[in-house]
Amino acid sequence: MIAEVVSVGTELLLGQIVDTNAVFIAQTLSSLGVDIFYRTTVGDNPDRMRATLRQALSRADVVITVGGLGPTMDDLTKEISAEVLGVELVVDPEIEERLRGFAARRGIKLPPSFLKQALVPAASGRPLPNPNGTAPGMLAENNGKTIICLPGPPNELIPMVEQSVIPYLAEKAGGSRTVIKSRVLRIIGIGESLAEDAVKDLMASSNPTVAPYAKLGECHLRITARAHDDDSALALIAPVEKEIRRRLGTAVYGINDETLEQVIVQELAARKQYVSLAESCTGGLIAQRITAIAGASAVLRTGIVAYANSTKEKLLRVPAQILLEYGAVSSQTAAAMAEGVKALDNSDYSIAVTGIAGPDGGSEEKPVGLVFIAVAGPHGTTVVKNNFLGRRADIQRRSAHAALALLREAIITAN
């Protein structure tokens, strides 16, 4: 079975909102073994919507639309979907009564367009209940093709998918149903090209497949298998994952949705060890990432944003001579910051970051993007010089990620 997702809304094209619904639906379809080859976004224009839906129906068995089911005049998804599919819409008295009751309870005077939400297929289809909103979804079939119309708000769409769409697609697939399962290995310390080179022979397989993806400061390898059930798919993935781990070793730090900070908190908690932070150019971003993880209170002792040199001296005990001779952005200052915050409350590890995030403040000797990261641990202090590219926020994010990666490396090599 082949499906296509069509997201409707000019606000999506303008980038005013992010289309998380399409991602959720694509993941759901994949878990059901339904192929999805295209995802399309179209604005609130009737002619372009018609053309988009016709094209989608020409190459998919099931088209799932998102958005455009509300009461306003530009909410035309249901009407245009029915027109393209060749299905007549009629007013459902029960839904109309519910909409009138909704308006009466809130003292709303109904505009004529409000009741168009009660339109449902006259035959070969049905409304999809929406307990969390006024606009029901729609499922319509004709000539072996299906259009499923879903509302835009995620709190309405997700329950509708779980309660109505998944059972329908599972039944439609019947005995031909297959399962597509994926497992993502998260890799730090080596780039996408090196990771790909290490596993390129495994990428030649058609089932399971292996695909690399570049991410901020790391890369991911996604292993995907197709089988008749979950256990069989996972059995195909297991030996490939084992071989990748053998080749890449500790560069594989997590799986699926595990984050670097989550793994670090788990590692420190398991060892009953503590970390402290001294941040300058990252402005507390490392602390924010760590404290976003449940259980961080068991491992994080102190986080200091030491932006001014006076703060570096007073709180972190960075010698004035180091700041005078080498400057705030230097390997010497980074090391002193890390050792100072570590000594402040006797932590097992500490991170320090100092650099030039820009867009101003750089020089030929010390350009924007120059960042020194230090990690102090049981076996001494390591300082790494980095030259990051990008805007201020990019440099800050890259610095925070690189700092966490250096901390993880210190933890796993010390234990």
Image (cartoon, rainbow, N blue to C red):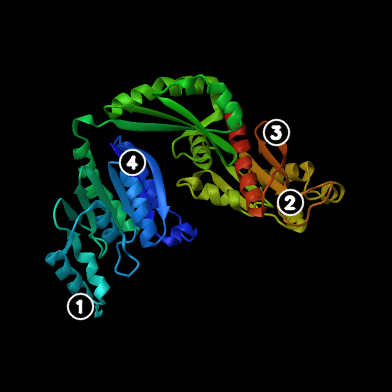
Q: Between 196 and 273, which is closer to the camera in this rendering? A: 196
In the structure shown, which secondary structural element does the residue marked by tag 1 occupy? helix
Q: Callout 3: few (<14), some (14-19), or many (20+) C-alpha neighbours within 10 Å? A: few
Q: In x, y percent, where is residue 305? A: 66, 55
Q: Are marks 1 and 3 in contact (CB under 8 Å)?
A: no
Residue under label 2: 356
Q: Is the residue 241 above or below the residue 73 in the image?
A: above
Instruction: Judge depth for marks 4 and 2 and give the one in front.
Output: 4
Identify the residue at horizontal 50%, vertical 23% (top origin): 245
In the structure shown, which secondary structural element does the residue marked by tag 3 occupy? strand
Q: CA distance from mark 1 to mark 3?
A: 71 Å
In the structure shown, which secondary structural element does the residue marked by tag 2 occupy? loop
Instruction: Judge depth for marks 3 and 2 and give the one in front.
Output: 2
Residue under label 1: 104
| N-terminal-most mark, 1 or 3 | 1
Residue under label 3: 380
Instruction: Judge depth for marks 1 and 3 and give the one in front.
Output: 1
Question: Which residue type does callout 3 highlight?
Answer: Gly
Instruction: Judge depth for marks 2 and 1 and give the one in front.
Output: 1
Question: Which residue type does callout 1 highlight?
Answer: Ala
Residue under label 4: 59
Q: CA distance from mark 3 to mark 2?
A: 25 Å
